[in-house]
Image: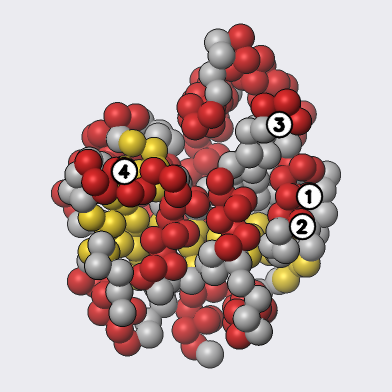
Amino acid sequence: MLNMHLDLLPEVADALAIGRPVVALESTIISHGMPYPQNVETARRVELVVRDNGAVPATIAIMGGRLKVGLDTAELEALGQGGAAVIKCSRRDIPFVLASGGMGATTVASTMIVAAMAGIRVFATGGIGGVHRGAQESFDISADLQELARTEVAVVCAGAKSILDIGLTLEYLETQGVPVIGYGCEELPAFYTRESGFKVDYRLDSAEEIAKALRLKWELGLSGGVVVANPIPKPYAMPKADIDDVIHQALQEAEEQGIKGKAATPFLLARVCELTGGESLASNIRLVLNNAELGARIAVAMAAA
């Protein structure tokens, strides 16, 4: 029985009712990830890629006191136009944004929660949050990691965001028993780059292999999610040394300006975009499209079992 606070777009509801593959998509990338109208155009392109690969897209957000699973044209437009004024919602924020009747954009963590409520097992995004650099003092650790430990959704991403401490993020995931699968790779990609210097847990080379592993994990009663790391396509990857220099500068500026908590990631990504002359935004769009394609293929393989 569906949660009473969920509104499913008719197309999504019909697909779930007959066992058609559905892929969840987050909305923070629309409101906080890029400017209007490019954010809405990108969101539509991502949904189209999911459709072209045989699945139904379900972009998730909070609107009018309801959890929305699948957005219509007007809702997507409103979210894009709202931009940074839209509340960025993680697990802790969901009941308060619902109670206020306001508009909320879901992060990786909250998208996982709502997807699981709706019965969606595959979610495609850009990159996951993780342990921030300097977390030994700040304790700044994304709620995404704890959600991966508890919620049974596979998150297809381009690895962890480059602004994070990749090594500590992987240590946290290992402690929580969250498998990290590398799709066609043995090294964890780091968002803008295809390499990070850190190994994944398992390399799998097809959507069918990944779907089989996911089914077995959950059939065995092993709760929690899975990270499916999908490297950014080579033509759009940025040189690791170049992006590392830019991130170092952005981190210094964030520290000088006292930017912390949920404001840190949007600031850092926006500053990296400025410092790279927009190149990082172009890479961001390409990796999201790439993840949507793989997410759809995994969802199709799971539905076919």
**Amino acid at circle 2:** Glu
Tell me whether circle 2 and circle 4 mark residues in contact (CB < 8 Å).
no
Determine the CA span between mark 2 and mark 4.
Answer: 31 Å
Q: Quadrant of residue 89?
A: top left
Q: Nearer the viewer, residue 300 or 150?
A: 150
**Are there few (<14), some (14-19), or many (20+) residues within 10 Å of tag 4?**
few
Q: Are marks 2 and 1 in contact (CB under 8 Å)?
A: yes
Identify the residue at image location x=39%, y=61%: 114
Residue at mark 1 to residue at mark 3: CA–CA distance: 13 Å
Q: Residues within 10 Å of mark 3 (few under 14, many from 20)?
A: few
> Which amino acid lies under the numbered mark 3 shown in the image of this protein?
Ala
Q: Residue at x 49, y 32 (%)?
A: 262
Sequence-earlier tag: 2 or 4 = 4
Per the image, the residue denoted by label 3 is 135
x, y percentage for residue 181? 71, 64
Residue 242 shows up from this direction: no
Determine the secondary structure under disc 1: helix
- 276 and 76: which is toward the camera: 76
Element under disc 4: helix
Please name the amino acid that badge 4 sits on. Answer: Phe
Q: Earlier in the sequence, mark 4 or mark 3?
A: 4
The residue that mark 4 highlights is: 96
- Provide the residue designation for mark 2: 174
| Sooner in the amino-acid sequence: mark 2 or mark 3 | 3
In the image, residue 13 above or below residue 263: below
The residue beneath circle 1 is 171
Which element is circle 2 on? helix
Q: Is residue 199 visible?
A: yes
Q: In the image, is 143 to the left or to the right of 3?
A: right
Q: Is residue 278 left or right of residue 81?
A: right
